[in-house]
Image (cartoon, coloured by chain):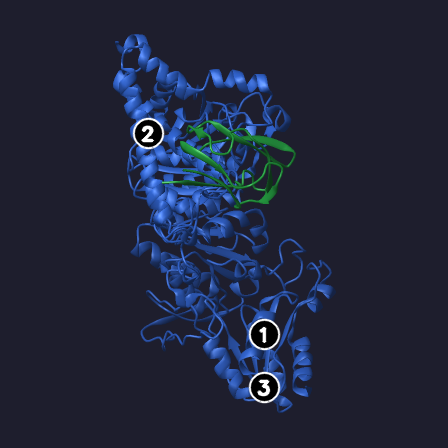
Amino acid sequence: MSTILTVPKLAMSMSEGTIAEWVVADGADVTEGQIIYLLESDKSTTEIEAPASGKLIHKAEAGSTLDCGTEIGEII
Amino acid sequence: MAQGNLGIEPNVLKAIYVQMSRIRAVDKAIQAGLSAGKFMFTYWPMTGQECIPATIAQLTTERDYMVTTYRGIHDQVAKGVDLFGMFAEALGRQDGVNKGKGGSPHISDPSSGSMVTTAIVGAGAPIANGLAISAKERGEDRVTIVNFGDGATSIGAVHEAMNLAGAWKLPVIFLCQNNQWGEYTPIPDYTAGPNFFGRAEALGFRGVQLDGNDPAAFYAGMQDVIDHVRAGKGPVFVEALTYRMGPHAGVGDNYNADKDVLAAAKERAPLEKTRALLAEAGICSEEELEGIDAAAKTEVEDAIARAMASPVTPAEETLTDVFADVTCVPQRGQYPERADEGEPTGEAKTMSMVESIRDAQQIAMSKNGEVFILGEDVGDPHGGVFGTNKGLQTEFGKNRVRPTPIAEQAIIGAAIGSSIAGMSPIAEIMFTDFFGVCMDQVFNHAAKQRYMSGSATHAPMTIRVQAGGGMGGFGAQHSQSMESWLLHSPGIKVVYPSTPADAKGLLTSCINDPDPCVMFESMMLLFTQKGEVPLGEYAIPLGVAKVRREGTDITIVTYGWQVYQCLAAAEELAKEGISAEVIDLRSLVPIDYHRVLTSVRKTGRALVVHAAVEFCGFGAEIASTINEELWRDLKAPAMRFGAAYAPIAYSNAIEMSQVPNSGSIIARIHEAMKA
C-alpha cells in the first residue's frame, strides 16, 4: 500500500507551503519517522517526517510553493 | 516491587501507562496524518499532558460525567470514547460519534460519560455544574469532572461556575490542566496570581495543586479528591501541573517556548518517565512495554482506516438535528399547518399573567419532580422580582426553587447541564438585556448542543425572561426587545405570549419540549392583562398563531405587548372603514407562516409590527417571506414597522415615540393602504 504525501495544513492560518529542501533523495528508502523534507510556511520551517516506511518518490521540485493538499510525493 | 517503594500499586501504574500509550498513539497518528497531508483538520495538541486523564481513568467509570475542551483528545481517549467514532467525527464522517456534525472540538458521547466538549474557553464549567446538580438531586454518586486549561481561569464563566458550585456544594471537580500556556501567551503575561488553586480557597471550597506529570502522586491526590467529592463534601479545584509540548494549534513543538524550557519540560514528560519506571521497577519487561505500544498503534491504525472509509456526512443532513422535529426549522416553501389548542373546556379562572405563569410552573413541578426553577431572587417571600414564582419555594423547597448568585452564565450553564442529564430546568433571566452577559451559554451551547452532538445529547431547558420597554423609566439597559438575537441563533425556540392563558399554555409546552425554549414576558402585560385561564394542565402547541381580530383589508402581524397597540390601531381604523386583521404570532420559532400567509392571501396587504428595532428585525424577515410567496396576490408590498434605530431613551417623550404605538401604527397602515 502506498502513502500519498501532500502539502499539509499545519496551522489554522496556513493556506500554502514551500518545499524548502528534500532531505531524502528521490528513489531512496525511508523509514517511518525519518525526516524527509523541510516545509516552509509563514516564515517558519518544519521538519516533516515520513508517515510510513518504503521508497520515496518526489513529485514536486524543491523550492516550489504549493497549496495545502497538493500532492508532492509518495512512499511506495 | 511493593507499593511502598513506588507509591502506587504496580498494576495501576501499568494501567495508567496503557492509557498514556493509547493517547500517544492517537497524538502521533494525528500529527503524522496532518504532516503527510493525509487529512486536514485543526488540531490542538496535548502532547505532554497524557498522565492527567490516564490517571483519572483509573478512578472513574463511564457513569461519571466529563466535560472538556477542544484540546481534549487525550481526555476523550482515556474516558473511553470509541476511537473509530472519534476519528470519524474528527474527519466529519457519518460514523462519527456525533454524525460528523460537531468534529473533534465538540465530542459528546454519553455512553462513555463524555458529555460536552466546548471550543469556547472556560464555557464548560457552568455546564458541568448542571450535570452535578442532576447527580446530587437524584442521589447518584457520580462525580462530574470539567477539564480546562490554565488559560480558562481568566474568563468570567469559570469564576461564576466556581462560585455557584461552592455555594451549592456541588459534586464537581474543576480540573485545571495547568500546561503553563494560555494559547500563545505564557502565564506571567496574563495573570499576577501566584497560583490557580488558591482561587477556590478564596471562594470557600477546597483547592489543591498536584503534579500532573507524576502518576503515583497524581493518583493518590486524585483518589483523595474524588472520594471527597463523591462523599458529598462539595467541589474541589485541582490545579494539575504539566507542560504543553505542542503549539496552541497545529503540529510539532511549542514554538513560542524558550528552547531550554522546552528541553527541560521534555525531561519531565510523563509518558517516557512512566515507561522507564515500569521497566526499572521490574513491573514490565521491555517486551511487554513494546506489546502495549504496539497494541495501541494497531488500535489507532484500525480506527483511522475505518474512519477514512466512512462516507463524509452529506449535505442532506444540514437541517436534521437543529431541533428534534425538523418541521420546526424555518424553511422556504415549507409552511406546515399545525393544529391549534382548541377551545378550552373545563374550569377557568381569571388570572393576571404573573398568576398564570406561577400556575403553569406549579403544575409542571407537581407533575414532574425533575422540573426546577433557578434564577436571581426566585425564592420566597418575593418569588422573583415580579413574583412569578411566589409560594413555589415554600411548596417545593430550596432545591427545586434555587435563588442564584448574580451570575447569568452560571444560571444558564446549570440549566444546560442539568437538562442534558434529562432534568427540566426553568432558568429565569430578569431582563432580556442581560442576555448580553450569558449569550455564549445560550447560543453557543444550549442552542447548538443537539446539532453539534448529532442528537447524541440535547438541552431541553426553558428560559423565562422579562422584557421591558414601553413603560418608561427603565432606561437603555432594561427596556430592550432582544428576541432577534435568539431568532438568529439556530437551535432555540422562542415564544412571546400576550395573554395570561397563552403564557400558561406556551410555558407548559416549553417545559415539556425536547428543545431549549425561551419565553419572553413583557413587563407591560405581567400585571395589566387579566383573563380567563383554564385550570389544571394546559398546553398550547408551539408554532400556532392566533387571529385576535378578523378583518379584510390588511393583516397586521405582531406579538407580545404590541398586540394591544395593534388592536387599538385596528379599532381606530375601523372607524375610517379600514378593516384590519390582527394576528398574534405567540410563537416566533417555530413560526406559523401557514396562518400568516392564509390571512394575507385574503387581505392582500400586510404590516408586521414589533417593539424591537426595525432595522434587521423579525419584521423584515416576515415581510420578505410574504412578498416572495404572495407577490401576485398583494395589493401593496408587505411592510414592517419596529422601533427607531436608537437605544431606548430615558426621556418619556422619546421612549413613547421611538417604539410603535397605536398612533404611529395607524400612520404606517395609511402608507400601506395608499401603496
Pick whichever of labels 1 and 2 is earlier in the sequence. 2
Q: Please identify the residue farthest to the front as the structure is shown.
A: A27
Please state the chain letter of the residue tagged with numbered disc 3 in the rendered image: B
> Going 63% across and 58% down the picture, which residue do you hit?
B479
Comparing B51 with B400, the one in front is B51
The colour one sees for chain B in the rendered image is blue
Q: Is residue B554 visible?
A: yes
Distance between mark 1 and mark 2 Cα atoms: 54 Å
**Amino acid type, callout 1:** Ser
- Amino acid at pointer 2: Ala
The structure residue drawn at horizontal position 56% and vertical position 55%, both measured from the top left corner, is B432
User: In the structure shown, which secondary structural element does the residue marked by tag 3 occupy?
Assistant: loop
Mark 3 or 2, closer to the camera: 2
Element type at mark 2: loop
The residue under the point 58% across, 16% down is B260
What amino acid does circle 3 point to? Leu
Name the side, left or right, on which B388 lies relative to B303. right
x, y percentage for residue B521? Answer: 51, 61
Q: Nearer the viewer, residue B496 or B630?
A: B630
Residue farthest toward the bottom in the current orientation of the protein: B577
The crowd level at tag 3 (other Cα within 10 Å; few <14, some 14-19, many 20+) is some
- Residue assigned mark 3: B634
Q: Is residue B209 above or below residue B352?
A: above
Q: Residues within 10 Å of mark 1 (few under 14, many from 20)?
A: some
Chain A's colour? Answer: green
Looking at the image, residue B402 lies above or below residue A32: below
Tell me, for residue B57, which label it has, or none: 2
Q: Chain of mark 1?
A: B
* Cβ atoms at labels 3 and 2 below 8 Å apart: no
Q: Residue at x 47, y 29 (%)?
A: B176
